[in-house]
Image (cartoon, grey):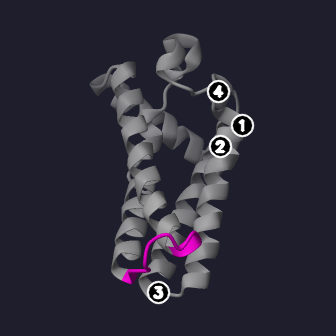
Amino acid sequence: MTGAVAAVLLASTAVQAQMKPEEMVETRQAGYQFMSWNMGKIKAQVVDGKEPYDQAKVAAAANAIAAIANSGMGSLYSPDTTTEQLGKATRLKPEFFQNLDEAGQIGRNFTAAANQLAKVAAEGDQAAIKKAFGDVGGSCKSCHDKFRAD
């Protein structure tokens, strides 16, 4: 077991002592919904052009995404929060815990992509923002494809 995986398991154990599995899922889902809402703001301005580009709003949205990505959400994952235990209350497949090294790498890739998005959004280069936005979306997709139930 790698040090990073051990750290996630220890942090998860601490959160488990404080939160019920259902609360962990609700909190996790709220974080992802908030990130999705902010991704929508960036998409509307930089990718689709449905709204006028406002660098300050894009940067604020990117900062919100990065803040959540860096908030330690990994501690909201426990073997008690999968579809096996909670059914349709969650979409986390039990396979997540059988592949912790891969799951951890996906999480680190997501955090790095979110941080890069915040960096380029602060600089204001729309082409760089569009690329970084795609990288964040790709990192989300890689986790969904592997560990999210339909």
Separation of disc 3 and disc 2 at Cα? 28 Å
Residue 117's label in the rendered image is none
Asked if labels 3 and 4 touch by Cβ distance under 8 angstroms, the answer is no
Q: Tell me which numbered mark, 4 or 3, is placed earlier along the sequence.
A: 3
Asked if labels 2 and 3 touch by Cβ distance under 8 angstroms, the answer is no
Crowding at mark 3 (Cα within 10 Å: few <14, some 14-19, many 20+): some
Residue 14 counted in the magenta span: no
Mark 1 = which residue? 146
Residue depicted at 33% across the width and 25% down the height: 23
Mark 3 = which residue? 124
Separation of disc 4 and disc 2 at Cα? 11 Å
Crowding at mark 1 (Cα within 10 Å: few <14, some 14-19, many 20+): some
Asked if labels 2 and 1 touch by Cβ distance under 8 angstroms, the answer is yes
Mark 2 = which residue? 143
Mark 4 = which residue? 149
> Which of the two discs, 4 and 2, sits closer to the camera?
4
Q: Amino acid type of disc 2?
A: Cys
Crowding at mark 4 (Cα within 10 Å: few <14, some 14-19, many 20+): some
Kindly state the secondary structure of the residue where label 4 is placed: loop
Highlighted magenta segment, given as a residue range: 46-55
Separation of disc 1 and disc 4 at Cα? 9 Å
Separation of disc 1 and disc 3 at Cα? 33 Å
Magenta region, main secondary structure: loop
> Which of the two discs, 3 and 2, sits closer to the camera?
3
Tell me where residue 38 sits by quadrant.
bottom left
> Which of the two discs, 1 and 3, sits closer to the camera?
3
Residue depicted at 63% across the width and 32% down the height: 148
Q: Amino acid type of disc 4?
A: Ala
Q: Tell me which numbered mark, 1 or 3, is placed earlier along the sequence.
A: 3
